[in-house]
Amino acid sequence: MYFYFVRHGTTINNQNHTFNGGGVDPVLTGFGQAEAQKLGHYLQEVHFVLKENKQARPAIKILPALTEMDLGDWDGVSITQLNGAPQIENYFHKPDLFDGHSLHAESYHDLQRRGYQALEQIIKSASGKKNVLIASHGLLLTTLLKSLNGTDLRDIRKDGLVATSSVTIFESKDGTEFKLKDWALKPAE
């Protein structure tokens, strides 16, 4: 079974350097829409992609557990506005120490647990399928995917987030062990 994890395209909040947590729902920029279309075209031969796919359209399931990390008081706030704020250093550089609850937000531990629960639910409902497409957000995907690849929570943000409009592919024979096939692929221009 192959799992194709896709991060959405660039949003207005990404462009404006604003916290883009689970409590906001910004639209894709024109560039973000173009990125997403390129990724759809790139994946058009895989049996699941919708608009660009040459195969039958599969059912779409929306899982609330795949929303972005709840950033509580920080959602929608400019990142520069929070420079020097308590927890900002931990948020960006020490995820295992980030106390999201002090901001009415999730911790990375909460996010990791929620990501795993969503993946377990997807595996149960996708049994027998060869390819599974999971579309979500940068921080949730980075936390989940790096965890699947054996990265300790303290190092989740070390190399940044998975790129917008990229696909990361894992293979699993049993739904418990995952092997990374490709990390954050973006279609050629």
Image (cartoon, rainbow, N blue to C red):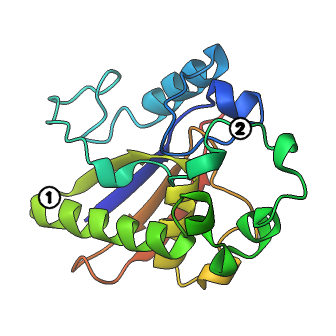
51, 109: nearer the viewer = 109
Which residue is disc 1 drawn over? 126
Q: Position of residue 66 (x, y in %)?
A: 37, 52
Q: Position of residue 159 (x, y in %)?
A: 75, 66
Q: Amino acid at mark 2?
A: Val
SS class of the residue under badge 1? Answer: loop
Which residue is disc 2 drawn over? 77
Can the viewer see residue 189?
no
76, 172: nearer the viewer = 76
- When the figure is inspected, residue 137 is found, relative to residue 115, above or below; the finding is above
Count of all numbered marks drawn on residues in the image: 2
Picture quadrant where residue 95 is located: bottom right
Left or right position of 1 against 185: left
Q: Amino acid at mark 1?
A: Ala
Left or right position of 181 against 89: left
Question: Image point 71% across, 38% down: which residue?
Answer: 77
Q: Position of residue 80 (x, y in %)?
A: 87, 42
Dot 1: few (<14), some (14–19), or many (≥20) neighbours within 10 Å?
few
Question: Image point 51% across, 55% down: which residue?
Answer: 69
- When the figure is inspected, residue 113 is found, relative to residue 13, above or below; the finding is below
Q: Quadrant of the N terminus?
A: bottom left
**Label placed on residue 44:** none
Residue reaching furthest to the right: 84
Q: Quadrant of the C terminus?
A: top right
Question: Image point 55% across, 20% down: which residue?
Answer: 33
Question: Image point 32% across, 21% down: which residue?
Answer: 51
Separation of marks 1 and 2 at Cα, in angstroms: 37 Å
Picture quadrant where residue 108 is located: bottom right
Can the viewer see residue 54?
yes
Dot 2: few (<14), some (14–19), or many (≥20) neighbours within 10 Å?
some
